[in-house]
Amino acid sequence: MMIISRRSLMKTLGASTAALTLAGPSVRAAFAQAAGKLVYWGHNYDTRVKIVNQTMVPGFAKDAGIQVQHENFETNQNELKILTAWTGGGGGPDLVSVGANNFANYVYRKLVSPVDYTAFGFKSQQELIDAFEPGALDGFIVDGKLYAMPMDLASISMYYRKDFFKEVGLDPEKPPTTWDEVTEMGKKLIKRDGNGTVTRAGWGWMARSASSHFYYWGSLLPQKGVDFLNADGSANGFKNDAGLAAFQYVYDTFHGANQVSALGLAPTINPVDDFASGRVAMLNAGLWLAPGIEQKYPNVTFKDGVYGVARLPQFKDGTPATRLNPWIYMVSSTSKMQKEAWQFVSYMTQRPESRDIWFKEANYVLPWKGFRETPVVKALPYAMPFFQDLAIGKPLPNTHRFAELASAVSQAYDRISANGDKPEAVVSDLADQIDNLVAE
């Protein structure tokens, strides 16, 4: 990537606005930094972009006298652009917001700086951590240092179609609380056409991307007291009876007498479409799903009792657990405006009025202590199951080899769901892959 010299920047100062607009994002970032602007990159979720551009950027400029240049990119391109800019010598943004799945890679490669707790008005890192719900920041700490702050720390809970429950004679006010009940109810809710092809799954595992495996069927592992990695990340954590039981449950949902799930219900896996159009009767997802459903399918509403929300089912003999599904803010380790960047994050997330805006307009959860008691949060009728599950949320496996880990986990899921490979073989092979991966 081209390095922008001071001379080049001075020439750029005299260039037209159109020429600057046509320049690449790293060039614009360098220009903004030279002009004393804080550069922030995020993904192109419309509601997030609107809040940042219309409220946060102008408000911070008025409050702190600091200008912010905000750019947004397609969600699946955002991280690639950030990594390319930060590792290619082109400067890139001061501040970013991304999904937390690849967090450890940023820290391992020394691309991000620790959180400046003084920018939030605290005297120590621990004081900042203690201002959040217990465990909310655990997944962002490496070697005792906090490297990220939450943009949205949602948990994974359950959605279910009340209308389908009524259709098959189930009580719509009594969703399943255990995985045994999911199987029992799912077998009543699953539908097949005349050829025996499943047209409606009783339960939908929303494994639509590499990282989503950890949020959805991967939540079964911590419920069994294990995970894809052991506690110190030095080996697999599931090559044991507890791990095998979790994989066995996933297998059973796709195959045999206890089938409640299916693949190929639609060309593209989209939880909004699958659930709202009736291809799935129950699924696990985050708080973000509800606004998407009701915006695209105005006849499928919580208010009218078409669907309900409940806590994530658990194993009877297990440890209560679900996954955290966080998006985070991080600051470049080479930024000349680190303090200002964390001050902007503080402005966007710490002020009560900012938190209200994020929750009311985007359903973003900012888990500062007491957030559940605010009027805006209390006004959302389906929020409580997610907040209850937040207390038992487990972070993603923490490794700088997350991309490779996710690929191996995805392949294991495909072997079980699509190929019907026995869990014993899949667990053994995946465990060996992971052990080799973390040993490199």
Image: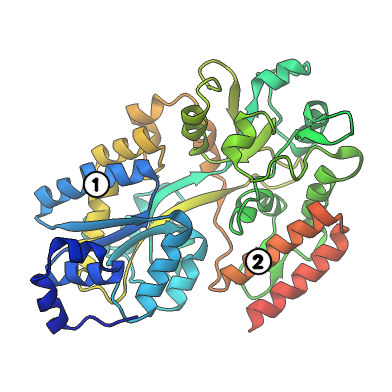
Amino acid under disc 2: Ser
Q: Residue at x 91, y 38 (%)?
A: 257
Q: Which residue is mark 2?
A: 407
SS under mark 2:
helix
Q: Nearer the viewer, residue 381 or 302?
A: 302
Residue 290 in view in this figure = yes
The disc placed on residue 53 is 1
Quarter occupied by the C terminus: bottom right
Quarter occupied by the N terminus: bottom left
Residue 230 in view in this figure = no
Amino acid under disc 1: Asn
Residue 318 spot, x, y in % from top left: 73, 46
Q: Residue at x 47, y 65 (%)?
A: 103
Horizontal relation, residue 310 to residue 21: left or right: right
Q: Residue at x 69, y 33 (%)?
A: 280
Residue 253 spot, x, y in % from top left: 81, 43
- Answer few, some or many: residues within 10 Å of disc 2's Cα (few below 14, many 20 plus, some between 14 and 19): some
Q: Nearer the viewer, residue 17 or 197?
A: 17
Q: Which scheme is used to colour this image of the protein? A: rainbow
- Answer few, some or many: residues within 10 Å of disc 1's Cα (few below 14, many 20 plus, some between 14 and 19): some
